Amino acid sequence: MTTSAVLMMVVAMLVVWGGLVASILFLRARPEVDDARLPDPDGDAPATDGR
């Protein structure tokens, strides 16, 4: 492989792995929370969908 090919491969790997690390860190800092799974602060039964 030529030097330019190796350099492009390294850049591409840094972009992919860097994006993966950044997304993991973002999700650890701000996880998505499903409102339906949260406990009711009043202590009542969980909300239903009206059926």
Image: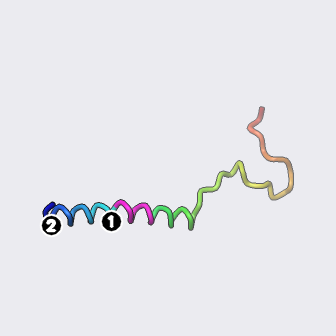
| Front residue (pair 4, 40) | 4
Quarter location, residue 38? bottom right
Tell me which secondary structure the magenta stretch mostly adopts.
helix
Residue 14's mark?
A: 1
Q: Amino acid at mark 1?
A: Leu
Q: Is residue 4 left or right of residue 24?
A: left
How many discs mark residues in the rendered view? 2
- Tell me the crowding category of disc 2: few under 14, some 14 to 19, or many 20 or more residues within 10 angstroms, Cα based: few
Residue at position x 27%, y 65% from top? 10
Secondary structure category for the residue under label 1: helix
Most foreground residue, 25 or 14: 14
Indicate the quadrant where residue 32 lies: bottom right
Q: In the image, residue 49 lies at what x, y percent? A: 74, 38
Q: Residue at x 50, y 67 (%)?
A: 25
Q: Which residues are magenta?
A: 16-21
**Mark 1 and mark 2: span between their CA atoms?**
17 Å
Q: Which mark is residue 3?
A: 2
* Mark closest to the chain's N terminus, 1 or 2: 2
